Image (cartoon, rainbow, N blue to C red):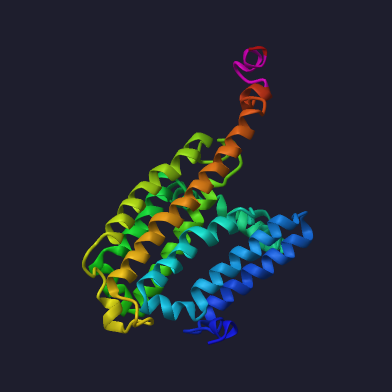
Amino acid sequence: MSLIRLLDPWEPSFALVAVFVVVAVLFARGSRRLRIGMVRRVAFWTGLGLFYIALHTRLDYYAEHQFFVHRLQHLMLHHLAPLILMAAYPGAALRAGLPLRWRSALRRWQHRRFVRFVAAIVLHPTFISAAFVVSVVFWLIPSVQFIAMLDWRIYTFMNWSVAVSGLLYWWMLLDHRPSPPSRTRPGLRVLSPVITMTPQILVGAIITFSSHDLYPVFTLCGRAFTSLPAVLDQSLGGLIMWVPAGVLEAIGAMMALRHMMRLSTLPARVPPKAKRGGPGGKAALQG
């Protein structure tokens, strides 16, 4: 099979294509309105392309019929693609790509009490870190994996949950702002990969060194590479979860450390009350 044929959709999805088109158009429009450097542009298009390859090409067929390819797919959705995409810091460009009326409506919507309440939960560092780990570990429970691989609705939800949790996590980790306005302190962003990496490495090691087939669903569905023994296929999948994922999180930690060191050289921020000359403001300025 040629490489071009590998890009053919395994299960065509109009909704999925529509999401990619909308995101691509918004970024392209926003890039013309803002000064977006070439490195950020390349990072965005590379990350978006990796998401497309993982979700809407023949790779999805092999992910359904071979465990180690399934782990490669989730490595792309959970680590590699969102890391590269969020390294482009696309938020400002995507907002700038919206029509002015939509940007105003989005700003008003963000200030609604219910939206702020939901954002306080969903964007909290503890929730994001927990979702990042659970979205991988939960789907690797053999009984859960068995059901997910046989029901296309659960399978789709599984892939989207992995992708969304990855986007949220790497958005949090690569945030280059001080706290506040960032919801996460710079030091915690450096420490977070160490915490989230540990359970993933542990589960990856258990899968790698298991002597029996934990996921017979791939045999039931028919393995794509029949010459590869089930236990070896499983070991390769565990190694993918163990080593490359750990390396990518270590890279993320170093990027977060770089941001923390940069922020440490900036002058201390003056409290808002001190700037306005409120109670204690003069003392704060003099101190």
- Residue placed most toward the observer, 233 or 6: 233
Q: Residue furthest left?
A: 212
Residue 24 counted in the magenta span? no
Residue range highlighted in magenta: 277-285
- Residue placed most toward the observer, 255 or 172: 255
| Residue 226 image position (x, y, % from top left) | 34, 83
* Left or right: 98 in relation to 143: right
Question: Dividing the picture into quarters, in which one does residue 52 lie?
Answer: bottom right
- Residue placed most toward the observer, 228 or 246: 228
Say which residue appears at 30% left-offset and 78% top-offset: 218
* Left or right: 18 in relation to 168: right
| Residue 97 image position (x, y, % from top left) | 70, 63
Q: Tell me: residue 81, above or below residue 60.
A: above
Question: Dividing the picture into quarters, in which one does residue 5 lie?
Answer: bottom right
| Residue 111 image position (x, y, % from top left) | 56, 49
Say which residue appears at 60% left-offset and 33% top-offset: 261
Q: Tell me: residue 259, above or below residue 75.
A: above
Q: Residue furthest front?
A: 227
Say which residue appears at 74% left-offset and 65% top-offset: 29
| Residue 23 image position (x, y, % from top left) | 62, 68
Q: Tell me: residue 262, above or below residue 137.
A: above
* Quadrant holding the C terminus: top right
* Left or right: 146 in relation to 153: left
Question: Dividing the picture into quarters, in which one does residue 180 lie?
Answer: top right
Report the number of numbered marks.
0
Say which residue appears at 54% left-offset and 68% top-offset: 51
